[in-house]
Amino acid sequence: MTTPAVTPLTGAVPPVPSKEVTTTAETTAPILPAKHADASAPVATNPDGAQVGPDSHVLPLGSATHPQEQADVIADAPDGLVDAQVEKVMADRRDELGHEPRGKVVDGLEDDVLWAMMRRFNTQINHTLSPPTKLPPGEPDLRPSTLPEVPFNSDILRSNAERVFATAGVWSIYASREALRLMSWDRRERLRTGLFCTGYFISAYFSLVIPTIVLLLILLTTVPKSRKFLFPPVPPPPGVPASATDPLNKKGDESALAGVGHPIEHRSKAEQVEQQAWEFTNAVQRFGMRVVVGGRGKGAGNGEVGRKVAVDDDDDDDSADSGELDGDNDDDEDEPARHAALEHGELEPTDKDGKPLTAKQKRKLKAKEAREKRDAAVGAAAKAAQDGLGGFADTLEVFANALSPPKCYPMPHPAARVKLASAILLPIFVVTAVVPAHIWAQVFSYAFGFGFFGQPLIKRGITTFVTYVPDWQEKLDLRNSIFSKVPTNAQLVLYLARVAESEYEPLPSPPPPPTSKESKNELAKTGVDVEAEQGITDGVAGKDSTSEGDGEGDQPSLKHKVAAKGTKKFLGGLRLAAKKAATFRGDVQIADARQKVGNKIDRVFYQSRAKDTFTPEEFPAKLDGTSGHIVIAHSPEGPATVSFRTLRKPDPSAAPFEAQLVDLVEVKKHGVFIARAVLGWAAAINLEGMGLEMRFKTHHERLTDGIGKGEDPHEETHEGQLWTFSHVARRDELFLRLLAIGGQKWETL
């Protein structure tokens, strides 16, 4: 596709020798038109009519990039890299002027925003199930599952934390600085600040401060153009990228830890939010001294790919831990009574042969039970934190998409922002404007007293309410009422992928974020750098080692030089051994690294030997130890299928596995097991899983299955057929295509 030339920017940055660019007004048709309505409407690549000249522009500078450095390399930079920066400049200009977003891939969504959302989708969505256990009719799918016994996943917890910072964190920073902007009485802000000040004190004189503030919120919510009128954007200085956290645009990119990957690169607002959210969670993880080690256990309950079962709330937790989820154990009914008898001392514990335990064995048994209870409590708390952050992040993303609806998604009518204002803000405005302040003081006083002294009545009322309204949580969920049919960012990505697949033009994989790989890899290391913490450098063990030197005080002695060098070699050997052990015969890869894992024998006999053609139809993988390609066939000529073709017999008729994508019911990405994750932590490398599981059911099995139906939507009748692949290349791209093609409704686990 063609890309636009650079929008002219002028200023005090030194002249930059730029590449020759064309000034012809070209048009390109995006893959996905806005709302999928105008199927072939071309989009002008230069909609603002800006004059473009070969020497009239200055590209913004990325963090830690000097203008002269950019000037030295811009002439030899790849065209695609330059064009991407140009598109970011034009996107920022469209946002500043209040014009509609016009992406080259999806009309109505800027490219950098799309790529950031797709990268977040790849880390957020790892396990999906179809059909959903509980999904209101007409609502977007890909909601969290209501299945019980879904284990904690540290990767999802980190992703949810990043999403919360990318919304609530960035909004809080921006809003606080916008308030400081009003408070400053700056020369450029005096008129606007004066008008706000006058309005506030007039409303205070009439005792209408709260109604006035609510009225302002109603205006900002229902009329998007009022946001730029009341809080006008400030253009960034020449050479400074638009800031996602500074309304004055003076600070530019505030990503503090890692710079950009190329001197001519810069981060757009969406990329700044993505980077700062990653830096925040990385800093929190580092602050906790790697308490959260990336990895997972063997899993339990409904977290594994296979038949799903229902679990009553009052069931004993040990029934799930024992792995007897299929109900074949005849002694399951006696387990709760047996455990109760053991706890009360009514039954003597015995070993596997039925003999009474010795005193030492009893102490070990009690210690084991205590450890299991602790682990269960910690796991439950971690899962609650994961789900809580995920639900909060979903609500924030839905709220953002309701206030500023993406043009590429069919939004409900009336708009969700109108329902938000009329159902919540307008009643608050009327009540606060009519009811005097002293009445509110009395109401709060009586409410506090009733809440403090009326606990029995409150508990009885809650019990009665839950009895008569068992689905009260669904009714109170704003996603089913005010925010009905408004998507989260993940749901938006899945919708766009489905529309692209319906046009037989799959979405391209997102490019990596514009961050230096070396800096990001170093920051992402969760292991302790023993050399740095002990002050070990190239032959120098620190200033304290000079006590036995030659008296100069600033030179280490030969003895300490040799000791430090030996210690460094020893630690390097241990780290190398840990790295080889972490990657040996493992279905893993080193994140953002070009080197291959494992030795030559491991790569030849264990890893996939299939070459990657980098097409959206073929993905190198291994099935049962055999190298080959996972092939997706999707065309108007027949039903969409997925198959595995070996290197020895690439003929489709000889494929050991082939299934229709409409029969796909579950997909899961394999993570990194805890043992390998700990070795990777010790080796200071970041491991990523490469495995993928798919489960299929025939049409008859799907019709007669019980999951998502009836009074017990958590019980699954049929197991289906399971296929496990390892060493899957471009797994995220394959995963998204599998979800988008078949037309199923999904939920996340």
Image: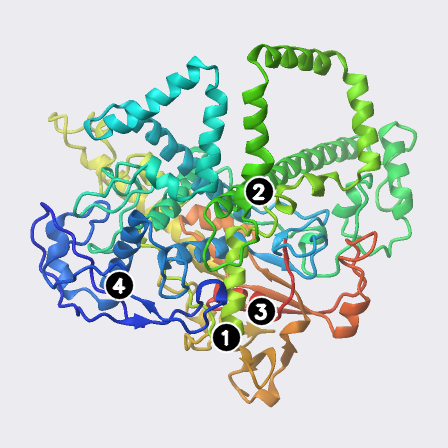
> Type of residue at label 4?
Asn
Residue 148 as seen in the image, left or right of residue 596: right
Mark 4 closeness class: few <14, some 14–19, many ≥20 residues within 10 Å:
many
Disc ID at residue 53: none
Which label's residue is closer to the chain start, 1 or 4?
4
Q: Which residue is mark 4?
A: 46
> Type of residue at label 2?
Lys
Residue 218 as seen in the image, left or right of residue 375: left
Mark 2 closeness class: few <14, some 14–19, many ≥20 residues within 10 Å:
some
Q: Nearer the viewer, residue 744 or 578?
A: 744
Residue 629 as seen in the image, left or right of residue 93: right
Q: Position of residue 683 (x, y in %)?
A: 41, 49
Which label's residue is closer to the chain start, 4 or 3?
4
Q: Nearer the viewer, residue 48 or 551?
A: 48
Which label's residue is closer to the chain start, 1 or 2?
2
> Type of residue at label 1?
Glu
Q: Position of residue 368 (x, y in %)?
A: 72, 36
Which label's residue is closer to the chain start, 3 or 1?
1
Q: Which residue is mark 2?
A: 419
Residue 528 as seen in the image, left or right of residue 371: left
Q: Is residue 591 visible?
A: no
Q: Nearer the viewer, mark 2 or mark 4?
A: 2
Q: Position of residue 447 (x, y in %)?
A: 68, 15
**Callouts 1 and 4 close, C-beta under 8 Å:** no
User: Where 57 falls versus 246 (above or below)?
Assistant: below
Which label's residue is closer to the chain start, 3 or 2?
2
Q: Position of residue 179 (x, y in %)?
A: 35, 27
**Callouts 1 and 2 close, C-beta under 8 Å:** no
Q: Tell me the CA gap for discs 2 and 4.
A: 35 Å
Disc ID at residue 725: 3
User: Where 522 falls versus 33 (above or below)?
Assistant: above
